Each structure stands twice: as C-alpha cells, then as structure tokens.
C-alpha cells in the first residue's frame, strides 16, 4: 500500500511539474482553443508585454485580451509579432505605459494586415501606435495620451480605420497613406496631419483645443 501511495504521489508531482513548465513556456493563458472554422474562438489572456507578444504571435490565439496595466522601461512593448495578422488585441481598458524617454513604441506593426487594436490606453512612448506598410487594420476606442512625438503614426499604409479614439496632447499623422477613415475621434490639445496622402475620409471628429 505504501508503494502505491508513493507512486501515486510521484505521478501527481510529475503532472504538476509538467503543468508548471507548460505555463512558464507559454506564459499567456489559452481560454478558448482554436477550432477549424470557429472565428469567434481562439481566446487568450496576457498580462505583460512579453506574454502579449507571444500570444499575438501564437497560432493558438486569435483574440488576445490584456488583463492588467503594463509599465515598461526604455523599449517597445508590442514589437511587430510575426503572426500578428487577422487578430484582435483588446486591452480591456488597461494601460500600456512607457517611461517617457528613449526611442520606443507602445505598439508597432510593420507589414501586417487585418488586425484590430481596441480599448487600449497608450502613454509615454515616443510613438503610441505606429503602423508601417500595414493594411486593413482597425484602431478603435483607444486613449492615446502624452506620447512624446506622435500619438498614432500611419506610414505607407492603406485601408486603415481610426474611429472612436481619444487623443490627449497627441497628434495623428498619416504619411504616404491612402483610403484611411478617421471618424468620431476626440482631439484634446491634438490634431490631424496628412502628408502625401489621398482618398482619405475625415469626418465627425471633435477638436477641443489644437496646439
């Protein structure tokens, strides 16, 4: 009987060890796994820049939800995850905060398409959100606050929707970008700047005080 108990205890310890190793390896939490044809599935949760980047890069995650505020020092938080295409990153009202110095990005995408970034508070980076060579992305319900250089920058990108965002002491800049919709945003001490960009739609935005 003692041998059986010892073996059972050993087996349980092995399972716990494997679980903890798997948790450490993945870091982010898979809430709902992917099923073929299930566009609403593949939900994952994350609580750090590294974990969210890994989740956005994972084929096991389509809808990624931030679970708490993030504060990061002197580096980019979400730095162009390779597989960040046709996914939703939902901060659920949580803040991604830099330290207000250096050259960094809150969220940086290059060569990506089909993504939605929503409900994020992005503050104190050089660039809050930067889209480069990106298409068919939707930025909605975000708060962009006191980033050093640009709040949202869109460069060489097309078919972007920027809607229902709030800019505080930050600007929105489009350069070499076309077919973008800028609608129902609030600019408080902020502004919209377009350079060498055409066929864009700008409507129903509110400017409280433009610097």
Image (cartoon, rainbow, N blue to C red):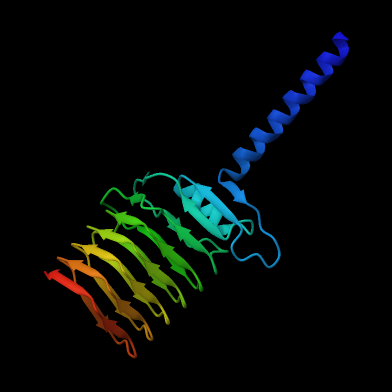
Vertical placement of residue 202 versus 14, above or below: below
The spot of residue 19 in percent (x, y) is 68, 35
Q: Residue at the location (75% across, 25% down)?
A: 12
The quarter of the displayed image where residue 209 is located: bottom left
Q: Residue at the location (31% across, 50% down)?
A: 98
The spot of residue 153 in percent (x, y) is 32, 71
The spot of residue 162 in percent (x, y) is 35, 73
* 110 or 16: nearer the viewer: 16
The spot of residue 72 in percent (x, y) is 36, 46
Q: For this view, does 12 lie left or right of residue 112?
A: right
The quarter of the displayed image where residue 36 is located: bottom right
Vertical placement of residue 150 versus 25, above or below: below
| Quadrant of the frame with the C terminus | bottom left
Residue 75 visible within the image? yes
Vertical placement of residue 95 versus 129, above or below: above
Q: For this view, does 211 lie left or right of residue 18?
A: left
Vertical placement of residue 101 versus 9, above or below: below
Q: Residue at the location (36% across, 59% down)?
A: 105
Q: Residue at the location (88% across, 10% down)?
A: 1
Q: For this view, does 54 lie left or right of residue 98?
A: right
Residue 149 visible within the image? no
* 119 or 52: nearer the viewer: 119
């Amino acid at each position: 009987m003692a041998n059986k108990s010892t073996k059972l205890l050993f087996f349980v310890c092995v399972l716990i060890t494997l679980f903890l190793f798997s948790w450490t390896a993945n870091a982010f939490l898979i809430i709902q796994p992917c099923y073929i044809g299930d566009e609403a599935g593949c939900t994952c949760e994350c609580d750090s820049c590294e974990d969210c980047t890994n989740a956005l890069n994972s084929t096991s995650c389509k809808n990624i939800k931030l679970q708490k505020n993030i504060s990061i020092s002197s580096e980019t938080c979400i730095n162009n995850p390779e597989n960040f295409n046709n996914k939703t990153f939902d901060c659920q009202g949580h803040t991604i905060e830099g330290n207000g110095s250096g050259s960094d990005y809150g969220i940086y995408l290059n060569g990506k398409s089909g993504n939605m970034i929503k409900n994020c508070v992005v503050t104190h980076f050089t660039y809050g959100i930067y889209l480069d060579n990106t298409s068919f992305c939707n930025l909605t319900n975000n708060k962009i606050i006191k980033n050093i250089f640009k709040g949202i920058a869109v460069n060489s990108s097309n078919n972007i929707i920027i809607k229902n965002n709030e800019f505080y002491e930050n600007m929105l800049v489009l350069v070499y970008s076309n077919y973008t919709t800028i609608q129902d945003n609030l600019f408080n001490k902020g502004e919209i700047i377009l350079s060498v960009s055409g066929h864009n739609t700008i409507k129903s935005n509110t400017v409280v005080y433009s610097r």
